[in-house]
Each structure stands twice: as C-alpha cells, then as structure tokens.
Amino acid sequence: MRRRPIDRADGPSGLDAPPPASASRLWSDHLGRWSTRSLQILILLTLVSVVIFALVQVKLVVIPVLIATILAAALSPVVMWLRRHGMKPIIATWITLIAALVIIGGIVTLIVFAVRGQWDSLATAAVSGFEDLRDYLSHLQLPIDTIDWDSVVASVQGFLTSSQFGSGAIAGVSAAAEVVTGALLVFVLLFFFLKDGDVIWNFFLRPFRGERLARGKRIGHTAVRTLGGYVRGTAIVALVDATGIGVGLAIIGVPLALPLAVIVFFTSFIPLVGATLAGVLAALVALFTNGIGAAVWVVIIVVAVNQLEGNFLQPVVMAQSLKLHPLVILVALTVGTILGGIVGAILSVPIAAVGWAVLKTWNPPQSPAGLGRGGPPTATSTPVA
C-alpha cells in the first residue's frame, strides 16, 4: 500500500491539521449574529433614506396625495351615509364636495369682508400701538434711543425696491403657482378617493390571497378609521379653541377677531404648538391695537381655553383616534417640519398615528403573536379612501 507523503503542515504525528473555520461558523457566534443584525439595520435605514429622498423630490405630488387621503377619510362617513340612503356614488361625492366648498368659501368670504372693513382702523391702531410700545421700552433703559429708525425705514424701502426683493417676489409667484396646482390636484384626487376609494383599494389587494388579503383589509379599515377620527376630533377641538378665543377677542374689542379665530382654528391642527402660536399672534394684535392690558387679558383667555381643551375636551374627543406619547408627537412634528415645512408639520402626526395603529393590527386578533384587539373586518370594512 502506498504511503501518503508527510506534509510540512501536518503535526508531529503526521495527522492532518484542523480545518479552518468555515464562514457559517464565523457568522453563527454572538459577534456574527450582532454583525448580521447591524448590517440588516443599516440596509433598512439606507432603503428608508432613499425612499424619503425620492418622495421629497416629488413632494408636489406626494403632499396633495396625502392631503386628499386624509380629507377623504374625514369625509367618507358622509359619502357612505348618502350611498346607504340610495344615492349613486358620483352624486353622493358631488354633494359632499359642494357642501365642503360652500362652507370653506363662506368662511373665506367672511374673513375678506372683516379684513376690508377694519383694515384702515387696524393700520392706524397698529402705528399708535407701535409708538406706545417704543415709549414703554424706552422707560426700561434699553438701548432703544440708539437705534436710527429713519435708517431702518430707509433700509426696508431700499430692500423693497432692490433686485433681491424682485427675485423673491418671482419666487413667491412660483410658490403661489405650485400652491394652486397642488390645490387642483387635491380636489381631483379627493373626488376620486371619495367616489372610488373602495374600488381603488380592492385593486391594490388583487395580488393577495388568504391571510395577506385579510391583513390588507385590516390595514385599510384601520387607516381610514384612524385618519378620519383624527381629523374629525381635531376639528372639534379646533372649533372649541377658535370659538372661545374669538369670543374673548370680540368682548375685549380686539380688531379682526373673526380672522384671528379662523387662524386659531387652522393652527390647532398642528399639535402642541399650533394653538399657542395663534394665541401669541392674537396677543400681539391686541398689544398693538388695544394696549398692554388687553394683551394680558388675551393671554389669560388663551391659557384658559388651552387648559380646558387639554384637560377635558382632548382626552374625550381624541382618545380613540390618537394614542401617541407627546414625545412621539414632538419627534413627528420635527421630522415633518424638516421634510415638508408647515404642511409636513400638519401631516406628520396623523401619519404617525396611522403607522402605530397599523402596527397594532398587523397580525390577526386570534394569533398568539397578534397585537390587534379588534375583531376581523367585515365585508363592509373596505376603506372608502
């Protein structure tokens, strides 16, 4: 029998050396598992970053789609109620849209007439209030007298006639054109979401069967319920804030009480900070037009209304539609503001609420690992938007 020659790599006894560790062994220990998980997290973060970057580049389309989806979720009960009473989907949709446009148009008309009727007196009162504030600050021994107000006015006038202001005005016209385009796109999308939202969602669910199909129906039903409840609840809270602050401003005699109340209503859709910013604006208007005493009373009214809303109204109205920790809301507001400005700040919180609600209903209720608590969707739970 032929003897195998002894290799130098063999041990003293001539036996083979232990084989090198395989790649599977390197990735199966603790460090390998941590490295695998870290690599997966990095890949996921990279994918999310790429998707967010792509969405930001086409935000002129993405933002109208999100706004139309949220509005459709809020108006869907009206459309469904009309459809259950025998109306065709297209007629129910047009009735809902026309009613919404009439309400919004009436509010805008009231604001325009209120501003036009009080503009002259507001401008005069603002100049007088500015002079009173300037005199008040001068008594505090602040370096107000060292400011050359004539040069400040000249600088402002120079900026208004400069090419920089002209380029800014052109940019403003471009932004206005984008706003008009986005508003038209929102209207068209809202029409089709209200009319054919269930058909559109069923079209996206066609490739799925079994549990995946049931999960898609649960997600759609949960998203519509969460978005609609959030918008309707926020609208109720905003209406109470606007009514309370508006009535207080009217009693004190602050000009433009109605437009300021409308501003309070819309800014209340920005959680945590919206109503506060609107209250600060109302206090400034009262300061410049009615004096420091009126501004103090406005601040008291704003604080009282916010406390009433935060401690009594919001927990009842928003309990079933938005269950997020204030820290999560703050982070969502920050991210939304960075990505989409004011519109992003308004849309970020409902999107975060929908994401959390979908996560809780991802698995079926009967599953041991299920996070959802609600029953399985019925045949009528297909989303309208």
Image (tube, grey):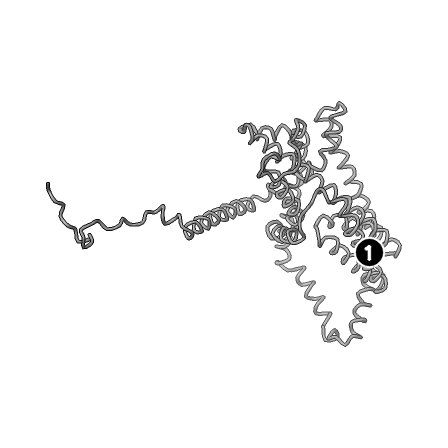
In the image as oriented, which residue stretches furthest toward the top? 86
Quadrant of the snapshot with the N terminus: top left
Q: Is residue 299 left or right of residue 76?
A: right
Residue position marked by numbered label 1 in the rendering: 304
Q: Position of residue 279 (x, y in %)?
A: 77, 56
Q: Nearer the viewer, residue 265 or 229?
A: 229
- Tally the numbered discs: 1
Query: x%, y% of residue 160?
Result: 68, 59
Quarter of the picture holding the C terminus: top right
Q: Is residue 177 visible?
A: no
Can residue 218 be seen in this snapshot? yes
Residue 166 picture location, percent across and down:
63, 55
Q: Helix, strand or loop at disc 1?
A: helix
Q: Amino acid at mark 1?
A: Ala
Residue 278 lies in what quarter of the image?
bottom right
Quick one: 310 or 169, which is closer to the camera?
310
Q: Is residue 59 left or right of residue 43?
A: right
